[in-house]
Amino acid sequence: MNNPIRTLTLLTLLTMFCGSLHAEETVQHEQHQAHKHEDNDSAKRKHQWSQVSESGLITAEVFPQQGKPVFNDYHNWVIKLSDAKGQPVSDAKIAIDGGMEAHGHGLPSKPVISRELDDGEYLIEGMLFNMTGAWTLVIDVLSTHENARFTFPLELSH
Ligand SMILES: [Cu+2]
């Protein structure tokens, strides 16, 4: 026999189920949008330096992971490598050096590349700046594309 209450309960459950499915889709969609939004922002990051290698084969971009440099504390930076077609350059070996030429001192820390965060994006850990001003960041890249040295003049301020 058909029980109307049972049918109603089933309908309610079905509606709730579909509702939650839909909610999940919406969340995923929003996350996707947020990610896209972030990507768009990377083009207009305030503290970001970009340089093309002498041969033009690789472009390197460096920026503080949190969006701006920190002073007198260890923090992370990111280096992003792409080839002439804009494709990520993965599995590169990267070394970092630098300092302040005007003051005749090097970097106060020994930053290292700890891992590749995403294709062609590498995490630089242990960056430290003990003063604002004109810093130079020298980055050596060994990759399948080429071995290149990038010298970034960074004018750092709060
Ligand atoms: Cu200095």
Image (cartoon, rainbow, N blue to C red):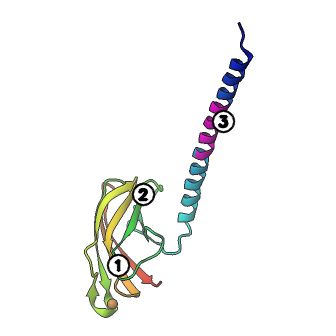
Residue 30 at x, y percent in the picture:
61, 50
Dot 2 lies on which element?
Answer: strand
Q: Which mark is residue 100?
A: none
Q: Earlier in the sequence, mark 1 or mark 3?
A: 3
Calculate the distance from the C-alpha at mark 2 to the C-alpha at mark 1: 32 Å
Residue matched to label 2 = 83
Residue at x 42% of width, y 59% of height: 82
Q: Amino acid at mark 1?
A: Asp
Q: Earlier in the sequence, mark 2 or mark 1?
A: 1
Residue matched to label 3 = 19
Q: Amino acid at mark 2?
A: Asp
Calculate the distance from the C-alpha at mark 3 to the C-alpha at mark 2: 45 Å
Above or below — where is 128 with respect to 87?
Answer: below
Residue 96 at x, y percent in the picture:
29, 71
Q: Earlier in the sequence, mark 3 or mark 2?
A: 3
Q: Which mark is residue 73?
A: 1
Residue 86 at x, y percent in the picture:
47, 56
Residue at x 35% of width, y 82% of height: 72
Residue at x 37% of width, y 69% of height: 76
* Magenta span: chief secondary structure: helix
Along the viewing direction, whichever of 37 and 154 lies nearer the viewer: 37
